[in-house]
Amino acid sequence: MNEEFSECEKCGKPINYGNAYVTIERNIEQAEFDLISYQEEIQIIDSVEVITLCGKCGNAFDTDMLKRLIKSIPFSNNRPSDN
Ligand SMILES: [Zn+2]
C-alpha cells in the first residue's frame, strides 16, 4: 500500500504504509515479573510521541547525542505549569 501514513518531521518526506520509520517517545512504564511465565512484562501506562522520522533521517539519528542532551536538561519541581 503506497498511501501516506505520516510524514518525516525532519525532512518532510511522506512516510507511507509499509515503510520503516523511527519514532522517539516518552513512555510511562511499569515493570512486573510474571511468576507463571517467568518473564518480565512491561506495561506502557502512557505514551507521548516526541518526533517521527523517515527511515533515512532515523538511521542518521544520533541516539547517544540525544541521551546526553536529555541528561543535561535540568529537572525542576518549581516549573510554573506544575503549580
Ligand atoms: Zn526524513
Image: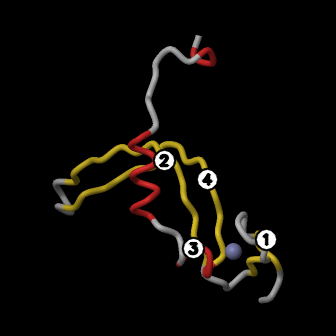
How far is disc 4 from disc 1 in space, using C-alphas? 17 Å
Q: Label 3 belongs to which residue?
A: 58
Q: Is residue 61 above or below residue 27?
A: below
How far is disc 2 from disc 4 in space, using C-alphas? 9 Å
Q: Of label 4 and label 1, which has the lower sequence position?
A: 1
Q: Label 4 belongs to which residue?
A: 49
Q: Check disc 2 and report its element: helix, strand or loop.
A: strand
Asked whether disc 1 touches disc 3, contact meaning CB atoms under 8 Å apart, the reply is no
Residue drawn at 62 percent across, 75 percent down: 57
Asked whether disc 2 touches disc 4, contact meaning CB atoms under 8 Å apart, the reply is no
Q: Of label 1 and label 2, which has the lower sequence position?
A: 1
Please, what is the three-letter code of the amino acid marked with disc 1? Answer: Gly
How far is disc 1 from disc 2 in space, using C-alphas? 25 Å
Direction from residue 18 to residue 37 in the image, left or right: left
Q: Is residue 9 above or below residue 55?
A: above
Please identify the residue farthest to the right as the structure is shown.
3
**Which one is closest to the eye, mark 3 or mark 4?**
3
Q: Which disc number belongs to residue 27?
A: 2
Q: Of label 3 and label 2, which has the lower sequence position?
A: 2
**Which one is closest to the eye, mark 4 or mark 1?**
1
Please, what is the three-letter code of the amino acid marked with disc 4? Answer: Glu
